[in-house]
Image (tube, coloured by chain):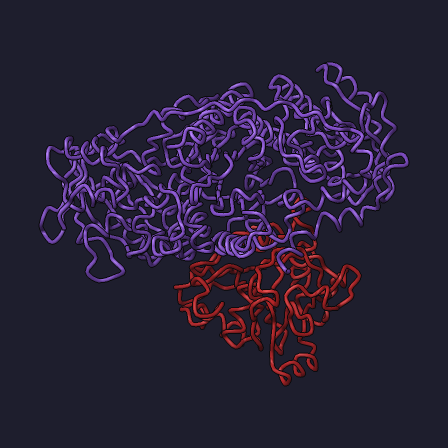
Chain colours: A red, B purple
Amino acid sequence: MRSSVIIFPGSNCDRDMDVALKKFGFKNQMVWHNDQSIPKSDLIVLPGGFSYGDYLRCGSIASKSNIIKSVIDFANSGGLVLGICNGFQILTETGLLNGILQQNKFLNFICSNVYVKVKDKQNKYFKDLKKDVLELHIAHNEGNYFCSDDELKSLEDNNQIAVTYCGEDGTENEKNNPNGAIKHIAGIFNKNKNVLGMMPHPERMIDKYLSGEDGSLFFKNILDNFK
Amino acid sequence: MEVTEAVAIDHGLKKEEFSKICELLKRTPNLTELAIFSAMWNEHCSYKSSRKHLKKMHTKGKQVIQGPGENAGVIDIGDDDAIVFKIESHNHPSFIEPYQGAATGVGGIMRDVFTMGARPIANLNSIHFGSPQHKKTRNLLRGVVKGIGGYGNCIGVPTIAGQTTFDESYNGNILVNAMTLGLVNKNKIFYSKAAGLDKPVIYVGSKTGRDGIHGASMASATFDDKIEEKKPTVQVGDPFTEKLLLEACLELMADNSIIAIQDMGAAGLTSSSVEMASKGNLGIELNLSEVPCREEKMTPYEIMLSESQERMLIVLEKGKEEHAKKIFDKWNLDFAVIGKTTNSKKIELIFDNKKVAEIPIDLLAENAPIYDRPWKKTKLPQKLKFDKDEFKTLKLSDCLKKILSNSNISDKKWIWDQYDHTVMGDTIQKPGGDAGVVRVHGTNKAVAASVDSSALYCFSHPLTGGKQIVCESYRNLISVGAKPIAITNCLNFGNPEKEKNMGEFVECVEGITEASKYLDFPVVSGNVSFYNETKDKGIKPTPTIGGVGLISNYQQMLTMGFKTEGNLVYVIGKTDGHLDQSIFARELLNEKKGPPPTVNLFNEKNIGETVLDLSRKNLIVSCHDVSLGGILTAISKMCIKGKKGIKINALKGLTNKYEYFFGEDQARYIIEIPKASLKKVNEILNKYSVHFDELGTVGGQSIEYQDDINLPIEELADAHKYWLKKYMDS
């Protein structure tokens, strides 16, 4: 499976994502933000970080970058686009995903392990995933997902909510929600479920010496579904 | 403006220093020249009070590639890999403007590291605040933590460990010390020594603004009531630009274009250009009209003194200008050829086609004043005679809970949750352990790092305190299974013009030197911060040690949490029950006098090597050093981390349980041993002739000790974990 990771000035999880993708067998290449086109890919990843310093608003300048038109075209033609953390913020700024990511409820940056519940498995990311709850890792200041009532209803009606924050046993409540996101949302799809944006970083959880290993399941599952 | 003695004094120079300048120059300097002298001759840049004593430090070792004197120290960790590291203070600016002060402290130390060609792989920090009751403490803490996080998180370098303390002596002078480790190929290290004539001098990074002018002089003076008026001297950081600068510099460093490189830190363009020329024994000519400026009509004076952040000065090979410019253009950074190296051995500044300054380099560097300041020895205080009957009114379990929730012992998760500690995907020991550990990317090796200071011990007896912190750093590294290699130090002291403060400095340095020599734990970099004093009240002497060690196979890393029920727990090293200067004495007896615990370097080394041997042979499964709060505090942390309890044995020949459990004797570790390894462990302990106590057995969900203690771990965790969060929320 061929993947491309876009590097924006200020991206800082690009290398981590490259390492993770290659570890599980993706043929990955790095693409610079000023390039006009993306090499042939089966998956495009917008990595975490602070693209363009996150000035103005997180992800907003990246959503107007040279490369982004190719990303949007790719998504609209059904290609898999994954945005992690800042990548999720960029996807909402481009309009590929609904809603916005506000500053965390308690106004602090949070770096911590979290549990997320997989809410939908009818998609190329989570189909046949063996677990329902994954232990992943967050590191963000603006991860508090919010959208209008209409948008929320549409997300729910179309099963576009991908993952929600929860406890180890899957319980969703205020206590297990680290940033105040509406409906505990940690990640969402577009309508066709080929575009996934989520705040947690699976690429930081890929071997047992790190914070955990559930990230491995995530990457392996995408590959398995591609075969 | 005419330069007079009064103007010189306004620039922080002493009367005698001004006469010396006139004498050396054989004329009165103009204002720009005076500014350059004031920037180079202040304490912060010239080390004029400390240099004499720093020379004595132990700085050499088998693995040392570069000792003090460069942007950072460098050590060899095998297979052509080297670690570049340094700690630096940003105390004065952080008190005036906590967010920007702390942020630019982190930015500055990272630049020192990547200037040498290394990619930063870990950040640490040691931060010290006034009493929790002081009205400014909460906001200062909040601002500093946000500033450190704001900068480090954006660059994408994990913050893997730190230290936070509270003491009223920091009420008017907080301390913010930031440390960075970087990884470099040992054949691709870059230095700041210029070489060759007529080589282009390049300015890259952000534009120069009016921020930070006089920053270095501000850091070389004591504070008064009006200090907050100095806010404009605090620099403003832009981590995004630094990230671009980091990537651009590393890209340019991949080939052989750079002769010398130096970041513009304290005293900006002045000190970076003078240092490069001085080290290369050359002259340098700068055309200041070519310097990219952020504001209009900046004068040579302002350009030379600005401490705008995220800027570098590079001496390039001739003909490489276009190649270099392309890289900086790609990263959207300013690039300008602003001068050249010369054989004049002078710094010559041109502005608007006129020469505006001309000073022989040696007057600024080698001829800078050095002071042999008078100092006073601190006598070892008398050991206290505690009234042990008074102890009996105290319940052991209440004492323990009180100590665990003490501001200096309690868990600092509220802080490190705000630092990205996992980015780069190689953090294998997070903050909250004895040391942070990151893997050397793509290898089996890992690097451990820890920051430590013990102001209470250093205040009571600086010589012992100096030794103790080096030992503490050594133990913290060994506790995670790392072999200690070298240290960096940040020497935070009061006013060196006072004999007592100067004495504290001299004796702490002596202690550090003695211990680092004995333990073969050399000092490779560091900085000195004097004048941490407000309205005549100085801080307690606070030398901070940043230690770095190597784990050759990261799978052998140790953590402190208890692992398996039924395993045995030993205390390695002898417990005499030293309570003077302990948390127990302060917190429960309100007793602040007495000497710090004695440091026995033979024991430190022997016991340290024993523990390292045990871990290399995979005979122990967890380890923690015993420090503040004594054995019971250490044990509690191991229980909380491992979510397992312990049954403590009835201890033979115990004279006093309070002394035993809360004494802060040095050179001790607690280890957890699987039953199957017990015989081998005992053999090794006997081989090294190390004293040990069989403390107990891992099991259950509480700490149990005879009829005295039966505390569920949950209760311990509550006492330990929430003090800081509650304090910040209140």
Question: Is residue B651 rendered to the left or right of residue A121?
Answer: right
- Indicate the position of residue B704 as horizontal and vertical percent values: 86, 38
Residue lying at the far left in this picture: please name it: B354
Residue lying at the far right in this picture: please name it: B707
Question: Is residue B459 rendered to the left or right of residue B355?
Answer: right
Location of residue A168 by image quarter: bottom right
- Indicate the position of residue B730 as horizontal and vertical percent values: 64, 60
Residue B19 versus residue A85: which sits nearer the camera? B19
- Indicate the position of residue B230 as horizontal and vertical percent values: 36, 54
Query: Residue at (55%, 39%) from the top-left corner?
Result: B440
Location of residue A100 by image quarter: bottom right
Location of residue B671 by image quarter: top right
Q: Quadrant of the C terminus of chain A?
A: bottom right
Residue B261 versus residue B418: which sits nearer the camera? B418
Question: Is residue B147 rendered to the left or right of residue A21?
Answer: left
Q: Is residue B377 above or below residue B99?
A: above
Can residue B10 be seen from the camera position used here? yes
Residue lying at the far bottom in this picture: please name it: A150
Can residue B162 be seen from the camera position used here? no
Q: Is residue A123 above or below residue B462?
A: below
Query: Residue at (61%, 54%) from the top-left corner?
Result: B417
User: How many numbered discs, if any?
Assistant: 0
- Indicate the position of residue B314 as horizontal and vertical percent values: 28, 43
